[in-house]
Image (spheres, helix red, strand yellow):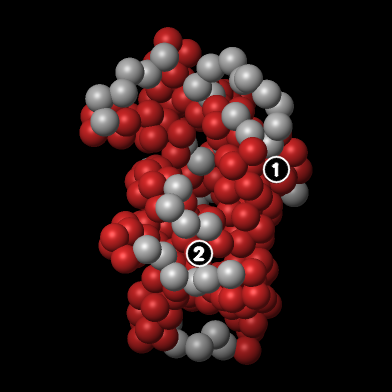
């Protein structure tokens, strides 16, 4: 149950962070927003992880290495996602990216995680719900599809790094954020400015804090229970984006998005009953 809750909190955090970042990226470069997101996360989580978990022990350094690799893959994931959104159809890009939860589930099952037919059905419902809610309608173009697929694959790779890392869940978040920041800072400096316009800095920092909470909940979800369940529930940000848009922005979900929400609720409810 706590795995499901942590996964859903991951999705909610990412969805809210994306709402804030969307406005910022219209006024600045994606790399600048990425830098502020990663810097905010590192400034918050590194001291917290050092206080509560300290430096990794000798036997944890393999796990620390996987957490560092997660930082590399997450930078790549966000870079691909933002470029896909710049050149491609929003619904198509988000729908293809949301498949990363399915990739995680498939890999962990291949590697030996037991899955009953009922659990598989619940996971499929959640995946279908994520895709339907993310897809806004018939795509006008397939541009951005390759960027979206790359974003989904690298996002899944980052999740799998968390799954198989034996470092503490706070340390995983701290190491991955620090590595993502270490990559983004020189790239941003070499290609342009690192500053976000003053009027949008509050949004940028808030997006970074929410993105960090998503990473922390994601790591916790994989620590608490089945990786397949954590991975699929954590990628429900499309569902939460539709719900937030409906509640806060008075947007009207399309018919297939309502179907997606129903599939997600059904799948999550079934997971809660059997896990």
Q: Determine the image quadrant of residue 70.
A: bottom right
How far across and down, in percent of the image, does residue 151 sit?
65, 46
Q: Determine the image quadrant of residue 39.
A: bottom left
Does the rendering let one see residue 87? yes
The local crowd at label 1, few if under 14, some if 14 to 19, many if 20 or more residues have their Cα within 10 Å, is many
Q: Is residue 52 above or below residue 116?
A: below
| Mark 1 or mark 2: whose residue is earlier in sequence | 2
Indicate the quadrant containing the N terminus: top left, top right, bottom left or bottom right. Answer: top left
Q: Secondary structure at mark 1?
A: helix
Q: Which residue sits at x=42%, y=57%?
A: 211
Q: Secondary structure at mark 2?
A: helix
- Residue of label 1: 147
Q: Nearer the viewer, residue 237 or 54?
A: 237
- Residue of label 2: 32
Q: Are marks 1 and 2 in contact (CB under 8 Å)?
A: no
Q: Which residue sits at x=65%, y=75%?
A: 190
Q: Nearer the viewer, residue 37 or 231?
A: 37
Q: Is residue 270 left or right of residue 222?
A: left
Q: Is residue 265 left or right of residue 155?
A: left
Q: Is residue 111 left or right of residue 167?
A: right
Q: Determine the image quadrant of residue 152.
A: top right
Q: Which residue sits at x=44%, y=39%?
A: 237
How far across and down, in percent of the image, does residue 48 sit?
36, 79
| Res. 58 mark | none
Does the rendering let one see residue 169? no
How far across and down, in percent of the image, does residue 233 sit?
47, 40
Indicate the quadrant containing the C terminus: top left, top right, bottom left or bottom right. Answer: top left
């Amino acid at each position: 149950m706590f795995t499901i809750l942590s996964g859903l909190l991951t999705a909610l955090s990412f969805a809210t962070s994306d709402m804030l970042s969307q406005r910022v990226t219209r006024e600045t470069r994606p790399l600048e927003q990425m830098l502020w997101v990663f810097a905010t996360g590192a400034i918050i989580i590194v001291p917290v992880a050092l206080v509560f978990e300290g430096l990794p022990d000798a036997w944890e350094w393999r796990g620390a290495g996987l957490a560092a690799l997660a930082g590399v893959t997450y930078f790549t994931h966000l870079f691909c996602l933002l470029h896909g959104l710049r050149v491609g159809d929003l619904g198509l890009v988000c729908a293809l990216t949301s498949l990363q939860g399915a990739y995680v589930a498939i890999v962990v099952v291949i590697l030996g995680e037991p899955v009953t037919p009922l659990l598989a059905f619940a996971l499929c419902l959640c995946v279908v719900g994520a895709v339907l809610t993310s897809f806004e309608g018939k795509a006008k173009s397939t541009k951005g599809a390759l960027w979206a697929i790359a974003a989904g694959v690298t996002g899944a790779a980052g999740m799998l790094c968390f799954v198989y890392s034996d470092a503490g869940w706070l340390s995983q978040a701290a190491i991955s954020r620090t590595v993502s920041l270490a990559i983004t800072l020189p790239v941003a400096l070499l290609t342009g400015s690192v500053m976000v316009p003053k009027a949008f800095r509050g949004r940028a920092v808030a997006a970074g804090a929410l993105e960090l909470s998503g990473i922390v909940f994601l790591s916790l979800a994989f620590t608490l229970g089945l990786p397949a369940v954590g991975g699929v529930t954590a990628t429900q940000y499309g569902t939460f984006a539709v719900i937030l848009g409906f509640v806060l922005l008075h947007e009207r979900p399309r018919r297939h998005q309502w179907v997606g929400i129903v599939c997600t609720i059904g799948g999550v409810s079934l997971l809660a009953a059997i896990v």
